[in-house]
Amino acid sequence: MKKFITHYLAGALLLLLFANSTLADTSIYSIRVDGLACPYCAYGIEKKLNQIDGVKFMDMDLEKGIVTVEAKDTTLDDQQLKQLFQDAGFTYRSKQESVK
Amino acid sequence: MMPLKKAQISALALFASLLSLPALAHDPVFGLGPHVLFKGGIEIAPEVHISKAGDDKGTELGMGLTYGLTGDWAAGIEIPYIDQSDASGSSSGQGDLTLFTKYRFWREDSPGLQESMTVAFKLKTESGDDEVSTGTTDSILGLAYGYEGRKWYRWTALRYRFNQEDDAGLRRGNKLLFDLVGGIRLKQTGYREPDTVWLLELNGESGQTAELNGAELSNTGGTQWFVSPGIFWTKRNFAVKAGVQIPIASNLNGIQQETDYRAKLVLEWHL
């Protein structure tokens, strides 16, 4: 009986961990940024975004002035993004968020 | 300090001409641009300058370190190693250490375009080996404007160098430098792809006559103009800048060696 309970608890724990990882929110942020003219100068944006816990991926479309960020269990708010892009040397305009 | 010979004064003038404010990121190769560095960012920039003016030849190896204090303000240090020769011989050693700062006081961002203006200051300390040091603490003040789009670039800048008098009574003339630069990115690439910008600079220099114990040295000072083709190649956080200064007009006082060429290669990492 003791062995059965141990196995049951271990299984329940694994199920809980699996459910937690698959149900976690992954958000895709599409951020409009002005001043993006050259890729080299924009490296500071990548560095600053990657310092945020939960940011899993980022990319930039310099032609459209769009920075795309994939973040898990993290909310990026306007004030935070405004400061981040100011520190990187660019101007934050707006963001759109969708859930993956 | 050893007495100054004509060739030494000439060599001092040659290497004084290599002093410039650091070029950050997408700045011109020889001129001053408005770029700073992102807050908390570190730039490591080893570079080499080569110069030839008649019998006067020089190579300067430098290491620049820059830190982004804010998104609009950067400061750093440069440590050069100089090897120079002229008709009277050659010398080499650690050059004068310099401290610099740049502050971007205006920036206008729009989609795919950034315009900005920066004020810059550099202090060259009297810290190098006697053989290659100017023996003075000099300063440079600069003002730069830049227009940077996805295809076209243009910059303009003014710099003024204030030279002090050394222990032997030699005071090199102050110098005014002017830059007008255009650039083009022929192919617009993505963020993680290699990116190339071609540059063409017009660099002007006007130097006052030097003085030795208050007496003007007639064979010093004057005006020179250069056309300088260059390239700026980058991939993500790594950049290579290279260019050659070719003299197109010269009005030097008295008898002086005219510049044959100057060349510059810079590697940059943003960390």
Image: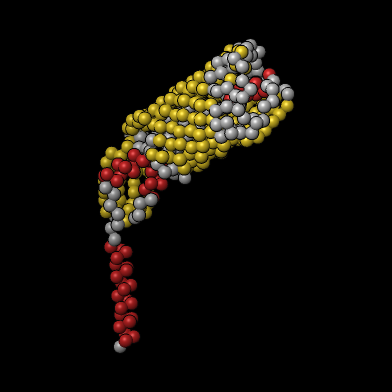
Q: Which residue is painted at 35% across and 35% down in the image?
A: A35
Residue located at (54% from left, 30% from top): B124
In which quarter of the view is residue A4 placed? bottom left
- Which picture quadrant has residue B96? top right
Residue A79's place in the image compared with B160, above or below, is below
Percent from the top left, x then y, of residue B110? 32, 32
Residue shown at the point (72%, 22%) measured from the top left: B87
Image quarter (top left, top right, bottom left or bottom right) of the C terminus of chain A: bottom left
Q: In the rendered image, which quarter is residue B82 located in? A: top right
User: Which of the two residues, B252 or B266, is positioned nearer the viewer here?
Assistant: B252
Q: Position of residue B255 (x, y in %)?
A: 66, 13
Q: Residue furthest bottom?
A: A1
In percent of width and height, residue B106 lies at 35, 29
Q: Quadrant of the N terminus of chain A?
A: bottom left
Q: Nearer the viewer, residue B177 or B149?
A: B177
B205 on left or right of B7: left
The answer to which of B85 and A84 lies nearer the viewer is B85
